[in-house]
Amino acid sequence: NAGVTQTPKFRVLKTGQSMTLLCAQDMNHEYMYWYRQDPGMGLRLIHYSVGEGTTAKGEVPDGYNVSRLKKQNFLLGLESAAPSQTSVYFCASSYSGQSGTEAFFGQGTRLTVV
Amino acid sequence: DAKTTQPNSMESNEEEPVHLPCNHSTISGTDYIHWYRQLPSQGPEYVIHGLTSNVNNRMASLAIAEDRKSSTLILHRATLRDAAVYYCILRDRSTAGYALNFGKGTSLLVTP
């Protein structure tokens, strides 16, 4: 049981390049989330999904797009990377949105945009 | 607006108990209190959660005040591996997608 797996773990991009971060979970969870964490800060929600085929914006969605074509995968795309998107990205999943449900996190993707 | 209030940092000696406080005066009746921790260079990790009664698991205990406006995470014997940022979070429907809303948490330093 791998839990939540993020790919890649590290990446360096040049300004203007594009890339896709992959999040995969094997727990049959409905809810999935993408967060970013900047130095000394808590996590901020970028986008989320409440089920296969659904996506919605979070707190800081600008410059990112997402897709959830399969229940187990949640993709985060950067179409034209900017230095301000240098951050650590975390994916999370949860069985439901009920308040008493715990969330599981991946180990993060460290992205640097130069 | 922050829904929980935690001290920025705390320090503990190894093998001593640690009590991490959290205030959540605006909590509603159906909000669970969650605690997560983040070790250096890792993703957040679930610790414990509860609604009204005190809760225990292999990692920690959660003591919830009778009026539910505050709670305390208890690590019974701190180890060096417990040095992390601890987040107290209310998971509720006011946050988009019922997402966990992370503040800055409490940075716990454990000294030998």
Image: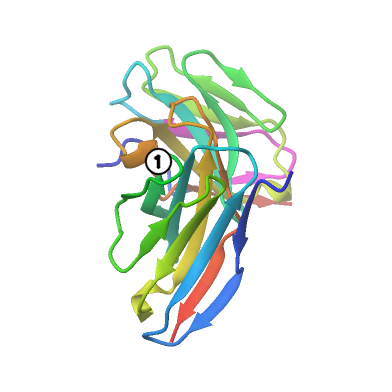
Q: Where is residue A94 in the image (x, y as percent from the top left)?
A: 52, 37
Q: Where is residue B74 in the image (x, y as percent from the top left)?
A: 60, 30
Q: What stretch is highlighted in magenta?
A: B11-22
Q: Residue at x 31, y 69 (%)?
A: A63
Location of mark 1 (residue): B99
Compare residues B54 and A101 and report the one nearer the observer.
A101
Compare residues B109 and B4 and report the one nearer the observer.
B4
Q: Can the viewer see residue A101 in this picture?
A: yes
Residue B80 included in the magenta stretch of the image? no
Q: In the displayed structure, does residue A35 sit left or right of residue A107? A: left
Q: In the displayed structure, does residue B26 sit left or right of residue B19? A: left
Which quadrant: the N terminus of chain B?
top left
Q: Position of residue B54 (x, y in %)?
A: 56, 16
Q: Which chain carries label 1?
A: B
Q: Residue at x 44, y 17 (%)?
A: B65
Above or below residue B93? Residue A48 is: below
Q: In the displayed structure, does residue B95 sit left or right of residue B71? A: left
